[in-house]
């Protein structure tokens, strides 16, 4: 038996045969020149036509996809006609390169630049590599490498998976994912969690696994083993039995002592919202509005935006829907809004900050959200991403007020927002912690890099301390308000304002206990995670959760924090978690 250990990014245990991704498209010969019968103008036109064809193919695939997969395909489609990529290739064609060689070199150059920038843009380098190969295949008139077909279910093994491939996985055929590279917040990890597929990333050496050979994959521990024996088969059988007990959420998030903790869903469009409602989510804790913008070369009209938001709101009449305004920039560049030449886009103009360089887009989006809210029965809350200061929070709240949106909030994704939360709460009504970015920025660790997975872990005590600081900021602001109530003509509410979590950490049933103990007031996650999170929360009282949270924050490392909390949750073994 050979054992490989990677990073487990999506729970589940499975045994199945290995199928490898096909070999990448052959590189055009170095120095390949234009044919004597082809002019640079003709070759450039063919290149642009191929890029447009690839974009159309990806958008067509997006039309048949849903949720996160749809978003990924639409974002990748934009790259096929990206001006920076095409312009660089045309320049090489004008210097005598063939169209195939030109787009290959241009793609390699752009991908290397993005990878060197780190952060979100490093992940975009995979998009460029994928698109580059697809355009070359289009120029050659051959199909691009795709996920292998099989009559029987299999475990897909790859160095890494292109976003466009990951987005269209058939979970009836692909029963687990294993990649040699990638990180815990890569497209592979995020989509695997959304599909409920066991997945392991950063498993060095798995490229050498024998095709069709049986392997055991544990998406929790990151274990990948060849020649599985009785113990591995028993582990799979136990998981299947336990997973069936964690398949339904009854629609009430609560602790063992009756303390209520609403469990909401992260969604990216109306189809996601309907799925979340069917899963008994208690509302939407994160509506990613990028679904309405990605795939467009121009800003969507007011009517288009209203219809898109209304589709989500209508799935949750009378319930809370938290809308995140456009989080453009970094890994989600938009031609009409973002600057792709930024030296460090993860720390650049993204999210709320785009309003400083392209004012008007945010205000128009808020107007569309307000109109959609008026036409629905949902209780609409609105928050801005990448808020760093109280002044930014105040400005966003003023924009919301101007449109009649009464419940403005902020995303807490950067340490400055967590550490000055009390001042932010002077201007807004709630906060939601985006733990994916908060971890990345707190630990200075690119969340896409498997080599930094140990640092880029929401169990890091420093990250937990920032979550606690945000909750304490809400409580401090409430006490401040109560202390000054006699000075106001009308007393202010002294209750702490809500602090939710909508990052991937909310979907971790064990970490959910810690978040409850830290005082967060709601958790939002992929609908598939609702039953398991609910089941674990119902095994602890609020005092027990607080005690475990204190141990986790005081731990010396992420591993120690996790070990301490798991030791305090004996029900995990019974639940198979």
Image: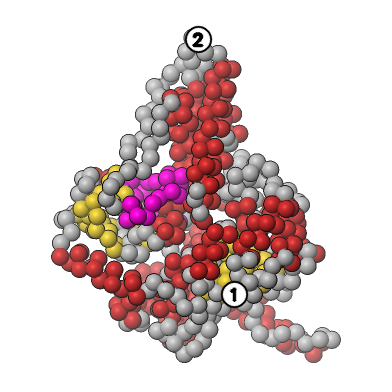
Say which residue label 1 marks. Answer: 499
Residue plotted at (52% across, 42% down): 60
Say which residue label 2 marks. Answer: 37
**What secondary structure is found at the residue carrying circle 1?**
strand
* Few, some or many residues within 10 Å of mark 2 (<14, 14–19, 20+): few
364 left or right, relative to 261: right
Residue plotted at (43% across, 25% down): 140
Residue plotted at (56% across, 27% down): 49
* Few, some or many residues within 10 Å of mark 1 (<14, 14–19, 20+): many
Visible residue check, residue 475: yes
Indicate whether 255 appears above or below 77: below
**Marks 2 and 1, Cα distance to the nearest angstrom?**
66 Å
The answer to whether residue 163 is magenta is yes
272 left or right, relative to 544: right
- Could you say which quadrant of the image residue 25 lies in? top left
Percent coordinates x, y for residue 94 in the rendering: 56, 18
Going from N to C along the chain, the mark reached first, 2 or 1, is 2
Visible residue check, residue 355: no
Closer to the camera, 96 or 526?
526
Percent coordinates x, y for residue 32 in the rendering: 43, 18
Magenta highlight range: 157-186
Closer to the camera, 241 or 180?
241
Residue plotted at (73% across, 53% down): 303
Closer to the camera, 437 or 20?
20
């Amino acid at each position: 038996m050979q054992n490989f250990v990677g990073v487990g990014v999506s729970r589940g245990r499975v045994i199945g045969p290995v199928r490898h991704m096909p070999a990448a498209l052959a590189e055009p010969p170095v120095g390949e020149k234009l044919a004597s019968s082809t002019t640079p103008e003709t070759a450039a036109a063919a290149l642009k036509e191929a890029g447009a064809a690839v974009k159309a193919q990806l958008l067509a695939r997006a039309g048949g996809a849903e949720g996160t997969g749809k978003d990924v395909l639409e974002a990748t489609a934009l790259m096929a006609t990206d001006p920076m990529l095409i312009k660089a290739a045309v320049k090489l064609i004008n210097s005598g390169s063939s169209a195939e060689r030109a787009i290959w070199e241009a793609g390699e150059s752009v991908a290397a630049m993005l990878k060197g920038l780190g952060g979100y843009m490093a992940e975009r380098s995979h998009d460029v590599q994928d698109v580059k190969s697809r355009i070359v295949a289009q120029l050659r008139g051959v199909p691009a490498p795709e996920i292998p077909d099989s009559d029987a279910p299999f475990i897909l093994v790859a160095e890494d998976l292109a976003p466009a491939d990951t987005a269209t996985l058939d979970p009836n055929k692909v029963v687990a994912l294993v990649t040699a590279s990638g990180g815990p917040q890569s497209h592979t990890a995020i989509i695997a969690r959304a599909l409920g597929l066991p997945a392991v990333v950063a498993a060095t050496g798995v490229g050498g696994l024998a095709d069709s050979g049986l392997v055991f994959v544990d998406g929790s521990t990151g274990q990948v083993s060849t020649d599985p024996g009785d113990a591995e088969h028993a582990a799979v059988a136990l998981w299947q039995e336990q997973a069936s007990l964690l398949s339904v959420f009854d629609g009430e998030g609560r602790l063992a002592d009756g303390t209520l903790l609403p469990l909401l869903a992260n969604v990216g469009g109306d189809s996601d919202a309907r799925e979340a409602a069917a899963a008994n989510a208690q509302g939407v804790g994160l509506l990613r509005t990028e679904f309405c913008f990605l795939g467009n070369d121009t800003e969507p009209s007011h009517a288009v935006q209203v219809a898109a938001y209304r589709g989500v709101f209508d799935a949750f009449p009378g319930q809370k829907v938290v809308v995140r305004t456009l989080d453009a920039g970094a890994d989600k560049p938009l031609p009409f809004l973002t600057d792709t030449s930024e030296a460090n886009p993860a720390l650049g103009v993204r999210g709320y900050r785009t309003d400083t360089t392209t004012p008007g887009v945010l205000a128009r989006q808020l107007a569309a959200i307000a109109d959609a809210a008026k036409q629905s029965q949902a209780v609409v809350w609105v928050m801005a991403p990448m808020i760093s200061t109280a002044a930014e929070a105040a400005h966003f709240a003023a924009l919301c007020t101007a449109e009649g949106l009464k419940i403005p909030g902020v995303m807490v994704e950067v340490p400055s927002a967590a550490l000055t939360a009390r001042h932010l709460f002077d201007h807004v009504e709630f906060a939601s912690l985006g733990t994916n970015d908060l971890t990345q920025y707190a630990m200075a660790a690119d969340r896409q890099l498997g080599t930094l997975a140990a640092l880029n872990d929401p169990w890091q005590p420093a990250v937990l301390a920032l979550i606690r600081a945000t909750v304490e900021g809400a409580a401090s602001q409430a006490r401040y308000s109560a202390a000054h109530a006699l000075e106001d003509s009308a007393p202010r509410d002294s209750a702490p304002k809500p602090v939710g979590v909508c990052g991937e950490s909310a979907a971790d049933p064990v970490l959910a206990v810690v978040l409850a103990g830290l005082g967060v007031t709601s958790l939002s996650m992929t609908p598939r995670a609702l039953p398991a999170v609910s089941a674990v929360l119902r095994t602890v009282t609020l005092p027990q959760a607080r005690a475990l949270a204190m141990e986790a924050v005081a731990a010396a490392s992420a591993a120690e924090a996790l070990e301490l909390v798991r030791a305090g949750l004996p029900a995990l073994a019974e639940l198979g978690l």
